[in-house]
């Protein structure tokens, strides 16, 4: 799922901030050695932190249904994770880098949720929206200056981009087919069966198990 969110972010940036053919969108660690090899305008979206959004954790399971409402299977709810990207621009001139960052802001700020056309197909069954935040101050435990220090580079203008995504949980529980027949015994007022043979009743299939 992480690599699919990477590609979704790449497509968004390609669609506005850095169109195809004008530079690169990469996800490498922006170390000194990496920066020394840059010879083309580049947007670097370095995934520096992955944390579960525990406030979204759910218990139990939920039912997946077909178009008629019949339960097909049961799944555990997904776990949600916050993917934090350190987004930087790399060119030969600071003015061009600032122009690129301005383009990133113009590209991302209109979206409070990841655009539906960029949501990974693997999440279609969940029918959920993926929150995206840009340049929101990170938690106190995540200092961007410390990140640059760990990378061995000098502090550089950057945008903190966070996409919150569900991560599907593997267990899937099959269910039995819906009940369509039943056997009942009709008794009289005195409790004695009216008929020696049980009666067979059929139930409509529409709606199925609930």
Image: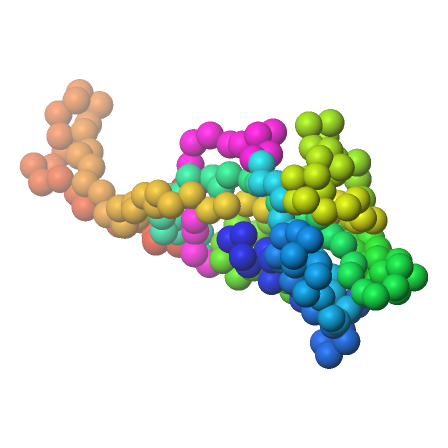
Q: Residue furthest right?
A: 95
Residue at x 78% of width, y 59% of height: 89
Q: Residue furthest left?
A: 196
Residue at x 36% of width, y 51% of height: 72
The answer to whether 105 is drawn above or below residue 79 in the figure is below
Q: Is residue 60 magenta?
A: yes
Q: Nearer the viewer, residue 156 or 99?
A: 156
Q: Is residue 5 left or right of residue 154?
A: left
* Residue 94, horizontal then vertical, whole percent: 89, 59
Q: Is residue 207 left or right of residue 50?
A: left
Residue at x 42% of width, y 39% of height: 76
Q: Residue furthest top?
A: 190
Q: Is residue 1 left or right of residue 182?
A: right
Q: Write down the quadrant of residue 62 in the picture.
A: top left
> Can residue 200 be seen by looking at this rendering?
yes
Q: Quadrant of the C terminus?
A: top left
Residue at x 77% of width, y 69% of height: 41
The stretch in magenta equals 52-67
Q: Is residue 145 magenta?
A: no
The answer to whether 129 is drawn above or below residue 53 in the figure is below
Q: Nearer the viewer, residue 148 or 70?
A: 148
Q: Nearer the viewer, residue 176 or 179?
A: 176
* Residue 58, horizontal then vertical, whole percent: 51, 32
């Amino acid at each position: 799922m992480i690599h699919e969110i990477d590609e979704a972010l790449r497509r968004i940036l390609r669609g506005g901030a850095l169109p195809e053919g004008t530079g690169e969108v990469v996800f490498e660690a922006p170390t000194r050695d990496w920066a020394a090899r840059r010879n083309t305008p580049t947007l670097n979206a370095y995934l520096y932190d992955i944390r579960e959004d525990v406030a979204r954790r759910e218990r139990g399971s939920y039912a997946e249904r077909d178009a008629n409402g019949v339960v097909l299977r049961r799944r555990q709810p997904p776990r949600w994770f916050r993917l934090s990207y350190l987004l930087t621009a790399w060119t030969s001139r600071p003015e061009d880098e600032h122009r690129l960052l301005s383009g990133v802001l113009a590209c991302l700020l209109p979206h409070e949720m990841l655009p539906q056309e960029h949501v990974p197909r693997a999440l279609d069954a969940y029918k959920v929206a993926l929150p995206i935040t840009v340049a929101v101050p990170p938690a106190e435990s995540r200092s961007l200056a410390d990140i640059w220090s760990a990378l061995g580079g000098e502090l550089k203008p950057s945008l903190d981009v966070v996409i919150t995504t569900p991560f599907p949980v593997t267990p899937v529980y099959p269910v039995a087919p819906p009940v369509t027949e039943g056997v009942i015994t009709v008794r009289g007022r005195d409790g004695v069966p009216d008929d020696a043979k049980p009666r067979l009743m059929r139930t409509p299939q529409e709606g199925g198990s609930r």
